[in-house]
Amino acid sequence: MTLVSEHIEHDTRDRILVVAERLFREIGYQKTTVADIAKVLRMSPANVYRFFDSKKAIHEGVARTLMGGVEDAAQAIAAKPGPAAVRLRELIVTIHRMNSERYVGDSKLHEMVEIAMEESWEVCVAHMQRLTETIAQVIAEGAASGEFDAPDVPLAAMCTCTAMMRFFHPQMIAQAASKPGPSLDQMVDFVLAGLTSRGKTGKR
């Protein structure tokens, strides 16, 4: 396959995903058909199936795109200079904000997330793994500089993600919105206090 044809194929795949996401937002995942997507793109359903073998595959592609945006934002924050605690706070707050804006405020996309967790769980698992790795990167840098006391960085990252699940998981964000509990800032303070180096606090 030539570079030109590869580029055309990649561009077509991207166009299919863009249209699919728009239709998922407008009429919902369940009501959107491959024929609907093909009609907007002015191509046949058979042509769409050349690039994605099922509606589920299209759905997974849209989910990966949306989740990839959160992963890219998290990685950009992790790569910044400055104290690890400041970056970790910004990273956690950004993940929460993006998931709230993308999924919770949009009932149609929220439906798509629920289906992803039922039908395409591996996509969600891979997403959380990437976010955990990015958080681990910041914690490792904080530990190396003496800012954090984290002898087991992978465990510290997993504990951080577990502690923040109420603020990361789209369904839990929606369910917890009207329920009592610590605020996002209070939970971040709690996580950072658990990571803070003994030498910084003098209390351990």
Image (cartoon, rainbow, N blue to C red):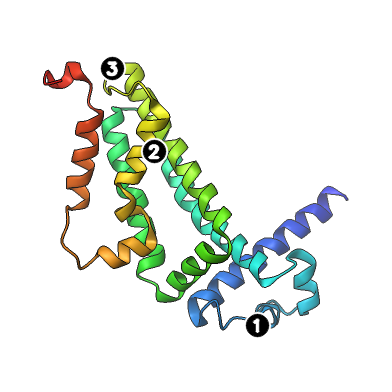
Image point (39%, 32%), residue name = 155
Mark 2–mark 1 Cα distance, whole angstroms, equals 41 Å
Amino acid residing under circle 3: Gly
Q: Which mark is residue 36?
A: 1
Locate residue 4 relative to residue 40 in the image: left or right: right
Mark 2–mark 3 Cα distance, whole angstroms, equals 20 Å
Label pair 3/1, CB-CB below 8 angstroms? no
Image point (11%, 21%), residue name = 203
Image point (73%, 65%), residue name = 52
Check the image and report above or below for 31 versus 107.
below
Q: Quadrant of residue 13?
A: bottom right
Q: Nearer the viewer, residue 77 or 54?
A: 54
Mark 3 neighbour density, 10 Å: few (under 14) some (14–19) many (20 or more):
some
Q: Nearer the viewer, residue 82 or 107?
A: 107
Mark 2 or mark 3, which has the lower sequence index? 3
Locate residue 160 relative to residue 49 in the image: left or right: left
Label pair 2/1, CB-CB below 8 angstroms? no
Mark 2 or mark 1, which has the lower sequence index? 1
Mark 3 secondary-structure assignment: loop
Q: Where residue 150 sits: x, y (%)?
A: 32, 24
Q: Quadrant of residue 104?
A: bottom left
Q: Which mark is residue 146?
A: 3
Q: Nearer the viewer, residue 111 or 27?
A: 111
Mark 2 or 3, which is nearer the eye?
2
Q: Which mark is residue 158?
A: 2
Mark 1 secondary-structure assignment: helix
Q: Quadrant of residue 17?
A: bottom right
Q: Which mark is residue 126?
A: none
Q: Is residue 80 visible?
A: no
